[in-house]
Image (cartoon, rainbow, N blue to C red):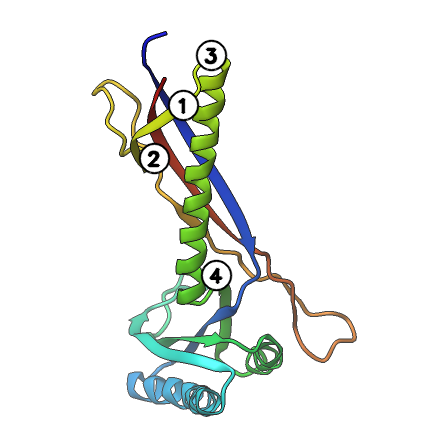
């Protein structure tokens, strides 16, 4: 039998326990006077920022940031359709990356009860080093799946060897112009935390999902 070209896809995924979590908070104040509202918002945010600075210095928090400060105003309407006096608002977003999940549990329980503070969500993730290493491992496994699949195809038609011609992320393999649109490249899914106050528990309890790292490749082989 003459040489045959085999084109296959290889996929692999790996589940990894999160190593750190980013807590997203917002601090907000409102009132009739712009300057006093901004000052009040800053006063509400200051203890959080000081606490996070201390936690970063002592461990448990890798880093934190305060950003996207906003100040705006509008005239609300009452239920009788009358426009009321101007109300000013001020808010700031704070995010902190915790590596100590127990400390985060107690901290979230505390700050969620403070005036003007809202917990907007949690993002569980891997450290950059672990994410890079895991993605490389998953990609290598995806390539091996493609090799094994091509070898199986070749064996099914009586051929004994395959030689790689092209290997690429999904959508990047050379193809005819009329083929379907490119598929996504390697992706990493971020798991969101599930918060459960717990009827007798002193702090919020977390049950993070595993982070799923996936990779898929397309490969073309010459089978003989």
Pick out the residue farthest to the top. 1
Task: Please report whichever mark, 2 or 3, sits nearer to the chain's N-terminal start.
Answer: 3
Provide residue 76's location: percent of width, then percent of height. Answer: 38, 66
Q: Residues within 10 Å of mark 3 (few under 14, many from 20)?
A: few
Q: Is residue 21 visible?
A: yes
Would you say 59 lies left or right of 42 here?
right
**Marks 2 and 3 close (CB-CB < 8 Å):** no
Mark 2–mark 4 distance (CA, rounded to whole Å):
55 Å
Q: Residues within 10 Å of mark 1 (few under 14, many from 20)?
A: some
**Marks 1 and 2 close (CB-CB < 8 Å):** no
- Element type where label 2 sits in the image: loop
Which residue corresponds to mark 1?
A: 161
Provide residue 215's location: percent of width, then percent of height. Answer: 43, 43
Which residue corresponds to mark 2?
A: 170
Mark 2–mark 3 distance (CA, rounded to whole Å):
28 Å
Mark 4–mark 1 distance (CA, rounded to whole Å):
78 Å
Would you say 76 lies left or right of 190 here?
left
Mark 1–mark 2 distance (CA, rounded to whole Å):
24 Å
Which residue corresponds to mark 4?
A: 79
């Amino acid at each position: 039998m003459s040489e045959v070209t085999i084109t296959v896809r290889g996929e692999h995924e790996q589940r990894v326990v999160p190593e750190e979590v980013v807590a997203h908070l917002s601090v907000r104040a409102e009132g009739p006077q712009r300057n006093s509202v901004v000052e009040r918002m800053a006063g509400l945010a200051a203890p959080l920022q000081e606490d996070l600075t201390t936690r970063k210095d002592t461990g448990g928090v890798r880093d934190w940031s305060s950003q996207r400060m906003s100040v705006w105003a509008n005239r609300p309407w009452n239920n009788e359709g009358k426009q009321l006096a101007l109300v000013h608002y001020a808010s700031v977003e704070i995010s902190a990356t915790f590596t100590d999940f127990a400390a985060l549990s107690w901290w979230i329980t505390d700050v969620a009860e403070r005036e003007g503070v809202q917990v907007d969500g949690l993002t569980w993730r891997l450290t950059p080093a672990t994410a890079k290493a895991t993605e490389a491992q998953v990609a290598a496994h995806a390539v091996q799946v493609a090799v094994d699949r091509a070898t199986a195809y070749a064996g099914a038609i009586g051929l004994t060897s395959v030689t790689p011609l092209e290997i690429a992320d999904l959508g990047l393999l050379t193809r005819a112009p009329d083929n379907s649109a490119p598929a996504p490249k390697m992706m990493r899914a971020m798991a969101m935390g599930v918060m459960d106050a717990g009827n007798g528990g002193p702090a919020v309890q977390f049950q993070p999902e595993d982070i799923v790292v996936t990779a898929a490749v397309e490969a073309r082989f010459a089978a003989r």
